[in-house]
Image (tube, rainbow, N blue to C red):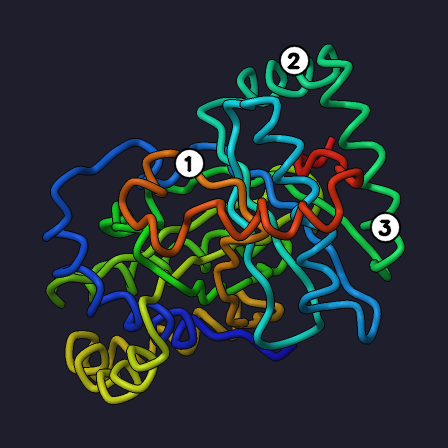
Amino acid sequence: MKTGTLLTLSCTVLLTSTLAVRAQESESRTDVMRPPKVLVISREFLKPGRSGAVHKKAEAAFVQAMSSAKWPTHYLAVTSLSGRARALFFTRYDSFADWENDTKAMERNVALSAALDRAAMADGDLLSDADGGVFLLREDYSLNPDIDIPHMRYFEIGQYHVKPGHDKEWDEGVKIVLKAYQNIPDTHFVCYQVMYGAHEGTYLFFTPLKSGGQIDMAIGHNKDFMSAMGEDGMKRLAELSAAAIEWSENNLFVFDPGMSYPWPEWIKADPEFWSPKSNKMAMSKNDKAPAESKTPQ
C-alpha cells in the first residue's frame, strides 16, 4: 500500500491504449463484453501453500455445480500476481433487483444449494480469510469502457481511497485525467465506486491486458500523457492528489478459465481459452465436492 496520486491513475490508464485496435476488430459486441452497472466481487485469501493446483481443484467444484444446474448467472475468476495470494470472483448484474432475484432463485434450488454447500467446506479449508464487496459503475469516471474482454488475459486493478470531505478535489483530479486522455487516441478504462463491503470513498479502476508486453509498452508512453497535461496541469494534478487521496494500491491479476464459470459468448469468442473441458477433467477426480455461491450475500 502506498500514498496515492492521480498520476498513478494516469499510468494505469496508459496500459489500455494498445488494446483498442484489437477491440475494434471484434465482429460482435455483446452485453457481456460491456461493464455491468453492478459488480459483485468475492475475495478468497489463500493459506500459504494452498494456492495453485490445490485451489483450482476445489474451485472446479463450484463450476461443476453451476454447470450441472445450467445456472444463467456466470462469473469470472482471477488470481493475484502481486500482493497477498488471493483469488477474486466477479459477478455482473444490471441492477440490485437482478442480484436479489438471482440470490433467491439459488436458495430455492435445493440440489444446487446442497452441492454448493458441500464443496464450500473443502474450499474453506484452503482459505485464511474471505470477504466481498458490491460496486457501482461510474460511467462519468470511465473512458471508452467497451472492450473485447474474452480475449484479454490480465486485469491491472488500481484501488484508491479518497479522504473524507475531499470528494471535490478527487472529482476535479479525475476529470483532469479524463480530459487529457480524450486527446490520446484509443484509451480505455472503467471505474467502479464502492456501495457495500469496503471503506467509503473506495474506487476501483480496471485495466484489461492481452499480454505482459503491453505493460512494457505503456512505460514508454508516459510522455504522451504529460504532454497532453502540460506543466501547469501536472502541477495542479499533484496538488489535487495530495489533497484528495489517502492511499492507493495497484495489483496485477491473471484470468483463470478453470476457476471461472464463463459466459457462453466468451466461450464462443475464444473457445481454446475458455472451454470448460479442463473443469470437467478436474471434477472427474473430485466429482463429489461442489461448493457455495461466489456471490457475496
Amino acid on which disc 1 is placed: Trp
Find out whether the residues at labels 2 and 3 contact each other: C-beta distance under 8 Å. no
Disc 2 element = helix
User: Mark 2 vs mark 1: which is more N-terminal?
Assistant: 2
Amino acid on which disc 3 is placed: Gly
Q: Quadrant of residue 232?
A: bottom left
Camera-nearest residue between 9 and 297: 297
Q: In which quadrant of the rendered image does the C terminus lie?
A: top right
User: Mark 1 vs mark 3: which is more N-terminal?
Assistant: 3
Q: Residues within 10 Å of mark 2 (few under 14, many from 20)?
A: few
- The CA distance from mark 2 to mark 3 is 24 Å
| Residue 263 circle label | 1
Q: Residues within 10 Å of mark 3 (few under 14, many from 20)?
A: some
Report the residue at 61% width, 30% height from top. Answer: 66
- The CA distance from mark 2 to mark 1 is 19 Å
Q: Identify the residue under disc 3.
A: 124
Residue 64 percent location from the top left of the image: 63, 37
Q: Identify the residue under disc 2.
A: 105
Amino acid on which disc 2 is placed: Ala
Report the residue at 85% width, 35% height from top. Answer: 118
Residue 241 percent location from the top left of the image: 47, 71
